[in-house]
Amino acid sequence: MPAAPHPGAADPRYSKRLAIVVPYRDRAQHLAQFVPHMAAYFERDKLDQQIAVTVNIVEQKGDMPFNRGRLGNCGYLLTRDSSDYVCIHDVDYLPMWADYSWSPNPARLIWHGLSIGEDRFTFFGAVTLLDNTVFAKVNGFPNCYWGWGPEDRELGFRCRTQGFEIERRDGTYIPLKHPHAGFSAPGVWTEEARRTNELYKKRQPGLQALAGEDGVNNLKFKLVEKKPLATSAGTLKNFWHYIVDLGAPDAS
Ligand code: UDP
Ligand code: MN
């Protein structure tokens, strides 16, 4: 007799296809921990195990300042035809106790383990999840931040101004340590953080209009390569490695 379907099978929270998108460059040690961890996490016996998931490492080519917003937008565009929702995921947070199920509302998945003092109610970064239609409606991330910056704060703003309520899921993650790109000492911004925060301040008066003008709808990029993700143990099913050319800061 065939096994009875799992009670979650008809539940949209567990029957939609998830694309995890990891903006990435030059963090090989983190990636080497992240990849086997994610494979094991989704194999473990719990509700998340039912989710059809792909893990997509989206690597920025070249040595322009890192642009996490553009990489998130690229990841969405590269996966939207084969998924229903997207999770933008930092490479340096490993889920211990988390919830990757679908929601019609944008959701922040991480709380415990965040390494900096964030506001529990407003923080919308590091590991966030959006239905594909929501990501398109809010026009994704701004493309304009080259270097450590507030692209995640603007994404949260875009969600709220489009009327979405942001879900706070207080997942527990293990943070992987790295030198901080935003602060050179406690409370002292690096040069690139100073630049992106100045731009953020300049954008404030027109932030709502800018959300429509600059985002996933006008992103230009080139897909240089797509390959199964290679690890020391071989390639993993449903893990992909994309290399993308984002252009240079002057181009939009
Ligand atoms: N990232 C990366 N290479 C970089 C900078 C950032 O791969 O040179 C990715 C990585 O996924 C990282 C995320 O962007 O987890 C956020 O950057 P970072 O960890 O520097 O920010 P913070 O820890 O301050 O949130
Ligand atoms: Mn980090």
Image (tube, rainbow, N blue to C red):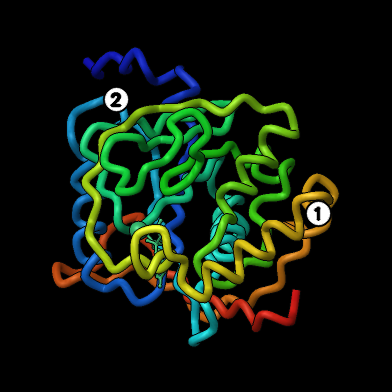
In which image quadrant can residue 132 be found? top right
Question: Which amino acid type is marked by label 1?
Answer: Leu
Question: Does residue 42 appear in the picture of this structure?
Answer: no
Residue at the extreme bottom of the image, as rendered:
62
Q: Indicate which disc, 2 or 1, sits on the residue closer to the N terminus.
A: 2
* Residue 42 x, y percent position in the rendering: 26, 40
The picture quadrant for ligand 1 comes to: bottom left
- The answer to whether residue 36 is left or right of residue 194 is left
Look at the numbered disc 1 and say if its residue's Cβ is closer than 8 Å to ligand 1.
no
Q: Is residue 239 above or below residue 165?
A: below
- The answer to whether residue 36 is left or right of residue 151 is left
Answer whether labels 2 and 1 touch (C-beta < 8 Å): no
Which residue occupies 46% across, 24% down? 13
* Residue 12 x, y percent position in the rendering: 50, 22
What residue is pinned by disc 2? 47
Quadrant position of the N terminus in the picture? top left
- The answer to whether residue 211 is left or right of residue 45 is right
* Residue 174 x, y percent position in the rendering: 21, 46
In which image quadrant can residue 221 be found? bottom right
Which residue occupies 29% across, 50% down? 93
Residue 110 or residue 221, whichever sits in front: 110
What residue is pinned by disc 1? 210
Residue 4 or residue 120, whichever sits in front: 120
Which residue occupies 61% across, 40% down? 156
Question: Which amino acid type is marked by label 2?
Answer: Leu
Query: How far apart are the alpha carbons under marks 2 and 1?
Result: 39 Å
Question: Does residue 235 appear in the picture of this structure?
Answer: yes
- The answer to whether residue 215 is left or right of residue 54 is right
Which residue occupies 41% across, 58% down? 187
* Residue 224 x, y percent position in the rendering: 54, 81
Residue 198 or residue 101, whichever sits in front: 198
